[in-house]
Amino acid sequence: MLGTICDNRSMPRLAQPQQGITFEELRKATRNRGMPLEALELDTTPAGLHYLLAHFDIPLIDPADWTLRVGGNVESPIALTLADLRSMPAVTLPVTMECAGNGRTLMDPRPVDQPWGLEAVSTGEWTGVKLSSVLELAEPQPGTSMVVFTGADRGIQSGVEDNYRRALPVGEISDEVLLAYDLNGEPLQPQSGAPVRLIVPGWYGMAHVKWLVEIDLTEESFRGIQHVYYRYKDSEADPGEPVTRIRVRALMAPPGIPESFTRHRFVTAGSVSLTGRAWSGWAPITRVEVAVDGRWHEATLAWERSGPWAWRKWSWEWNAEPGEHELACRATDANGNTQPDAPIWNLHGMGNNSIQRISVTVS
Ligand SMILES: Nc1nc2c(c(=O)[nH]1)N[C@H]1C(S)=C(S)[C@@H](COP(=O)(O)O)O[C@H]1N2
Ligand SMILES: [Mo]
């Protein structure tokens, strides 16, 4: 059931000039969490450090009671248990996932929503079954164009009450789209979508539906509220473009040590190994550059690791001289996509892949 509730408090807003973080943003930021950027040192993000985003409440599902229904435009609707899924051939894929709102607070004016800095990204080893194998069991009928995924979580967003729901066009369902039940070799934790979530390699986080309970095949296009919200648009009237794959980005593990409150970085003069990770949902990473005080240098890319959907390590040796410096990094992918200097503004603060800058005091 889908109802419209007149509640202006759920409407997205823009911060006034000079306005600090609101109470609602603070509350969202304490429910959700980012991956501390020092974890950019690791290929695989430990489950407890994986960033977290839930729009509504975390559903606490007993795996023994859970079933996944597959229906709609199919010959034989089915309901699978977790044991059914675990008895099918398993696939493991390292996948970098990033929230489309990552970098939102760096936009001006600031879209008021989950107030991400740059920490809404992580890489997990996801194990599960191929979505395509499960769809085959239900025998899709000809004419199917969209597959709609429903999570068990429900709430009100932009005045509309619904479960969390996202759809994928059938053309996007490659053999790498998974129904995942393990993260890093362990059953999913409640916050990660237990018992089963969707993994759509290369796509921004919103596509990876957690707490999956239903899959519906349809002949029509789908315009649920999460498809209205996740668009690059300049005003509510602007239809905009859908948010889909992850834009190219590099991030650096902040060097040296932080001041506890400001998190400003302090580094000892001499040779400093700067490292980080780079990723793109569009094409493999081909280049990462590092800038010191605006002068760009070529970083070294580590060997490609298992599969194209995980971030790639990069490094560069910095001969740090005493004084105040600004570090930056920038990635380019095989399609020639690179990162803008400044955020490209949009109403909901989506897809901000502008260059990361870190101020450092060297002594
Ligand atoms: N059912 C459901 N799935 C969801 C969400 C949600 O709120 N409910 N949030 C989405 C968003 S916006 C992101 S960024 C990712 C976050 O996944 P994580 O918490 O495992 O990092 O889950 C996606 N899947
Ligand atoms: Mo997200």
Image (tube, helix red, strand yellow):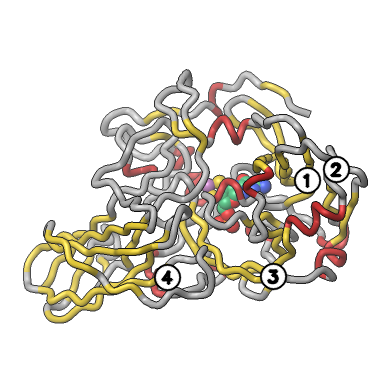
- Whichever of labels 1 and 4 marks the residue nearer the N terminus, that label is 4
The residue under label 3 is 91
Q: Secondary structure at mark 4?
A: helix
Q: Nearer the viewer, mark 4 or mark 3?
A: 3
Determine the residue positioned at 65% across, 26% down: 160
Determine the residue positioned at 62% across, 51% down: 208
Image side of residue 304 versus residue 222, left or right: left
The residue under label 1 is 215
Image position, residue 224 (x, y; %): 66, 31
Which image quadrant for residue 320? bottom left
Where 282 falls versus 169 (above or below)? below
The residue under label 2 is 71
Judge by depth and name the residue closer to the eye, 307 or 346: 307
Image position, residue 88 (x, y; %): 82, 68
Determine the residue positioned at 7% across, 67% down: 323
Q: Assign the C terminus to one quadrant of the image.
A: bottom left
